[in-house]
Image (cartoon, rainbow, N blue to C red):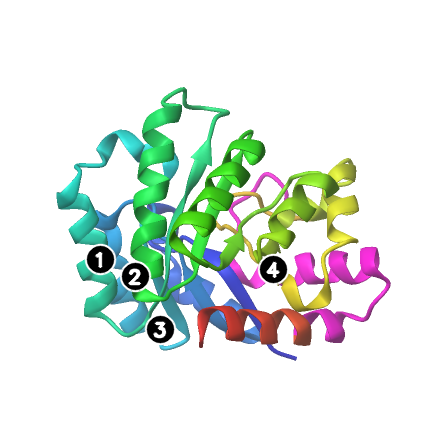
Amino acid sequence: MQLIDTHVHVNFDLFKEDLDSVSARWQSAGISKLVHSCVHPDEFESIKQLSLQFPELYCAVGLHPLDAQKWQGEKTYQQILKSAQSYPKVVAIGEMGLDFYKDDQQELQKEVFWQQLTIAQLLNKPVIIHCRDAASTLQDILRKFIREKGEVTGVMHCWAGNPEETQWFLDLGMYISFSGVVTFKNAKTVHASASIVPSDRLLIETDCPFLAPTPYRGKRNEPSYVVHVAEKLAEIRGESLETIAEQTYDNASRLFKI
C-alpha cells in the first residue's frame, strides 16, 4: 500500500533535530511521495534542498494569505514565477488563498490570490488553496478568474468546509484534501463533507507539523500519521483502507503530475 501526503511543512524548526527519524517513519508507513507546501517564496531554497535530500519529496512555491502584507508587487510575482520555472520538482503554486479568520486585510489578500492564480495558469500548474472563513469570497474569485482568464485546477487543502461549500469547489473542478481534522470526534461538518467528495477528487494530507490526527492530537504532526486520515476516510465512506490509499495516490499523482 502506497500513500501520498499532499501537504507538509517539514522545513519548520520543529523537525530540525530529528528529520532523519521522521523520514524513516514516513518511509516505513508507505508514504512514497510528499508535496511540500510553501508559506513564503523566501523559504523555497530550503524546500528545494529537502527535495534533493529526499527524492520522494516534491515542491510548491507561493505566498500564504496571512503573509499577504509581504507581497512586494512585481518583485514577489517574479520570485514565485522564476522559482517555479527553475526547478522541475516544483509541482504546484501555493499555498495561497484567503484567511479571514485571523487577518482583516481582505482586499490585499484577494489581490495576492489573483496574482498567484495568474502565475499558476501561465505555468500550467495546479494551485494549493488555503481557505478559512472565506469560502464564499474565494468561490467568487475563482469563478471570476475562470470566466475571464480560463481554467485553473488545484486542491482545497486541509478542508473543513460544510457540504454546500464543498460542492461549490467540486463544481469548479477542485480536488478536496482532508487532514487530521477529519479524525476529530466532533468534526461532524468535516465528516459530512468527506462523505460527498467523488472518489476521483479525494486527497489526504497531514499539514504537518500542525493538526495531528487522533490519537496524536495536540502533539507535533508528521507525514507518517497521514495513514490515520486515510483510515478515518475509509470508515466514513464505507470503503477499505486500501481503496482510499489507491484512490488518493492516483488522484495526487494525476493532479501534481508526479
Residue 199, compared with residue 30, is above or below; it is above
Residue wearing tag 2: 122
CB of mark 2 within 8 Å of CB of mark 3?
no
User: Left or right of 87: which side holds 143?
Assistant: right
Where residue 143 sits: x, y (%)? 51, 45
Q: Residue at x 46, y 51 (%)?
A: 146
Q: Residue at x 43, y 63 (%)?
A: 35
Mark 2 is on which residue type? Leu
**Disc 1 to disc 2, C-alpha distance:** 9 Å
**Crowd band around label 2 with a 10 angstrom C-alpha radius: few (<14), some (14–19), many (20+):** few
**Disc 2 to disc 4, C-alpha distance:** 27 Å
Residue wearing tag 3: 54
Residue wearing tag 4: 204
**Crowd band around label 4 with a 10 angstrom C-alpha radius: few (<14), some (14–19), many (20+):** many
Residue 72 magenta-drawn?
Answer: no
Residue 239 magenta-drawn?
Answer: yes
First of labels 1, 2 by sequence position: 1
